[in-house]
Image (cartoon, rainbow, N blue to C red):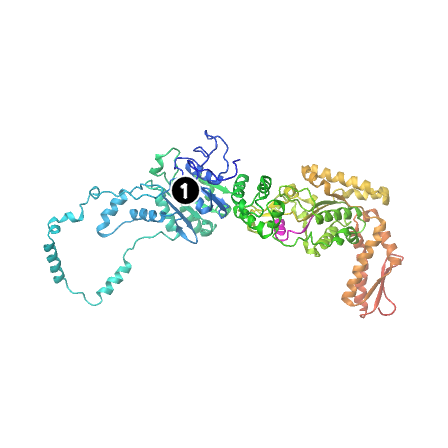
Amino acid sequence: MSTPGFAKDGPGQGSGRYAAEDGPPGGSPDGSSGGDGTGPVTADGMMPLWAVSLGWELRRGRQVILDGQIRDRWWFDDRPASFRQLVAGVLEARGADVVGWWDPVAGLTFPLPGHAERFAALEANRTPATGATAGTADADRREPRPWTDRGGRGARQERESPGNGAPPPQAANPRSAADPLRRESAVSREDRDRPRPRAGTGRDRDRAGLLSPRPAGPPRAFDDVVATVHRLAASPEAATAFVFQDVDHQLPPGRPESNAGYLRLREAMTDAVTPHAARSGRPPYARNAVLCAVGDVGRLPGWFPLEDPRIATLHIGPPDPGERRLWLTWLLGEFNGAQEAGRHEVEALVGATDGMSGWDIEALARTSWLRDAPLRKPDKLLELHRLNVSVDPWTQLDRETVARAAGVLGTRVVGQSRAVDAVAAALQAAFVGVDFGGSGNARPRGAFFFVGPTGVGKTELAKAVAELMFGDQSAYARFDMSEYQQEHAAERLAGAPPGFIGHEQGGELTRRVQERPFSVLLFDEIEKAHPRVLDKFLQILEDGRLTDGRGQTAYFSQCLIIFTSNTGAEAVQDLLAEDGDEVPYSALEAHFTRAVEEKFRTIGRPEIYGRLKPGVVVFDMLRREHIVRIADRLLGQLTESVRERHQVELVPDADTLHPWITGRMDDPERRAYGGRQIRNELERLRAAVVAHFLAHRPPPGSRVRLGTGTDGRPWVRAGEGNG
C-alpha cells in the first residue's frame, strides 16, 4: 500500500496529464508499480484504482459501462474532483480532443474548457453547406482539418487557399481590382438601374430569414445525440470521447422504444474506431470512447451489457483502505483534534470507515466539530456520525432501574431466574459502556440465544427488556424465522440484489435498524431458518453491521439481539415422565446445550454457535410452584378485561381454581407445553364467563364469582352485594 500523502510532481504525476501512449501513474504503462508491469497497483494521488482500470479497458479496445458510486466525490491530479471531472480528465489525458457528456437533464454538454468549440468545428466540417460555399464544405468533408495540439492549447492548421482547387476571390478580375474609379462608376450604374423595392418586400425578406439555415448547435434530443456520437466515433479523423450518464432514466427497460434506443447506443459503442492520432503512441491503441454511467447496472436491460464482448462493465465501489487512507490524509486538518491525533488513530479510522464514500468521509470531519468528537476517539466519532442522535437511550436509563433490572424483569417472567439474571447483567454492562471494542467495529450491545421448552417465557422476556429500556414495546421487533425456511428468503432480511423485484425497498431487517437503531431484535425459532439465512448473522455478530442490496449499511451497535430456539424440547416430555419435578436444572442445561451444539454442527454452521456460545441461556422447565403464579396472572388479566368492558367485578375462587389447574398440569404431556398450556386450560373458564354474561347480563357495579366444581366443570355465580 502506498504511503499516505500527495503524489509528487514528476513524469505522469502532478501535472494532470500524461501522454496517450503512457499508462496510468505508478511507473509503468500498465499502471503497476513494477517496471515489468507485474507489480501490485496501489492508490496514489493521481486517480482512484477504478479509473486506472477504465484506462486499461479502453486500451483493450472495449467500451465500458460504469456503475456504482457515480455521484461520489473522488480525486484527480492530487485534487478532489467529482465523478464527471475525473472521467473527463482521464479521457482527455488519454488523448481525446473532444469530451462530451450527456445526461437527461442538461442534454449534451462539455465539461472541459474549449471542447464545445472543438465539437462545433467538427460538426461544421461535416455539415453540408449551401450556395457559394458548397464546394468548400465538400472539400472540408473530404479532408478534415487536423488538430495541432491534442490538449487544445494550440490553433488548428489552416490549409492554404491554392491547395483547395479554387482561386482567390480577388484574382478573378484583376483589372477591376486595380481601377477604383471604374469600380465606383459600375456600382453607381447598378444602383441607378436597380428597381425600387415595393412595400412589404422588407417584411418578406425578414420572414424568409426565419426559415433560412442557421449555425447548428449541439443536438439536444437523445436520438440526435446518439446519431451524432455514432458518426464521430466511427470516424478515425478525430479523437473523441462521449459519456452517457443516467441513460436508464431516459430509456426505462421494458418499453419497445427503449429497446430501440439501447440498440442504437450499443451500435455507437461497438462501431467506434481507433483515431489516427492514437496510432502515433505505444500499442495497444484505444478506440474512440462511448461510455455509459449508471448508478445500478441492474436497471439496464440484461442483454445490453452481456451480449457483446466488446462492452465491459466496471463497478465503482466505495474507496478501498488505501484510498480511504489517502482521503483521510488530505482531510486530516479538517478534523477536530487533528493536532493531537497520531498515526494509530488515523489507521483506526481507516479501518472503521470501511464502506463509507468520499462524501461520507468529508461529512465525518464535519461531525467531529458538530458533536465535539475529537479524532483521537474514532469509535465515539463514528458512533455519533452513524446514529446521528443526541440522546443515547442506554445512557438515559435510571441508575436505580438498571440496578434492579433483575427484579423488574422477574415480575414479568416467572420461574426463569437464570435467564433474567443473564439479561440484566447485559443491560448493566451496556449502561456502563465497557466492552472489548476495537477499530470502530462495534458489536451489538448484547447477543443471547434463548433455548428451552416451549411456553416458558422466552418471547415475554424480550418484550419486557424492550419496555424496560425504551418504555415502549414497539422498540421490540420480532422476526418469525419459520417464514425464512427457503433459501431465497435470506434476501428478505438484507434486500433483493440489483435487478430483482423489491430491490429498491431494501431488506426488512436492515430497514428496521436504519429507522430505529436502538432496538431489541428477536429472531424467534431460529432453528427453522435456512442455513443461508443464518449466514447473514455472522457479520452482525462479529462486526455489528449488515449491508443491504442497495449498498446501504445498517449498524447494530446499539441493538440487543435475542435468538430463541426450541431445539431439544421434544425430549422434555420423556424427562418429565421419568423423573417428574425432580429433573434438576443442571440436567436440563446440559441437555439443551448439547442439543443446540449438535444442531449447528448438523447444518454445517458451527462458527455461528461459536459466536453465540457465551450468550446461550437455557430456560428452566415449568415447575409446580410456578403454575399457580402464572394462572393467577392470566386470571387477573381476565378480571381486568371484564371490569373495563362491563364495569362488573369478577372474583376468581382460588380455593377451587388452584387445585384444579395444578391437577390439570400434572400430566407430563401438558407440562411439556409450558405456560401456553395453562392459558389453553383457562380458556374453559373464559367461555363460562362469556356464556354467563349472555344469559344473565349482570348490571354494572355487580359482582360475579368464578370457580370449578368437584367434577372440574367451571361455574359462574352472582356474588353477594355490589362491588
Q: Position of residue 319 (x, y in %)?
A: 53, 42
Number of numbered tags placed on the structure image: 1
Residue at position x 10%, y 52% in the image: 179
Q: Position of residue 554 (x, y in %)?
A: 61, 48
Q: Is residue 198 visible?
A: yes
Query: Which region of the structure is painted magenta?
Result: 508-523
Q: Is residue 667 above or below residue 195?
A: above
Q: Does residue 290 appear left or right of residue 654 in this picture? A: left
Q: Quadrant of the C terminus?
A: bottom right
Q: What residue sits right under mark 1 in the picture?
A: 91
Q: Is residue 698 above or below residue 80?
A: below
Q: Does residue 298 appear left or right of residue 235 in this picture? A: right
Q: Is residue 458 magenta?
A: no
- Tag 1: amino acid: Leu
Q: Is residue 507 visible?
A: no
Between residues 575 and 400, which one lies in front from this camera angle?
400
Find residue 568 and report its image quarter.
top right
Between residues 585 and 663, which one lies in front from this camera angle?
585
Q: Does residue 173 appear left or right of residue 617 in this picture? A: left
Q: Is residue 509 magenta?
A: yes
Q: Is residue 37 above or below residue 104?
A: above
Q: Position of residue 127 (x, y in %)?
A: 29, 49
Q: Position of residue 200 (x, y in %)?
A: 22, 67
- The crowding category of the residue bearing disc 1, from other C-alpha atoms within 10 Å (few below 14, some 14 to 19, many at least 20), is many
Between residues 542 and 572, which one lies in front from this camera angle?
542
Which element is circle 1 on? helix
Q: Does residue 316 appear left or right of residue 471 in this picture? A: left
Q: Residue furthest top?
A: 36
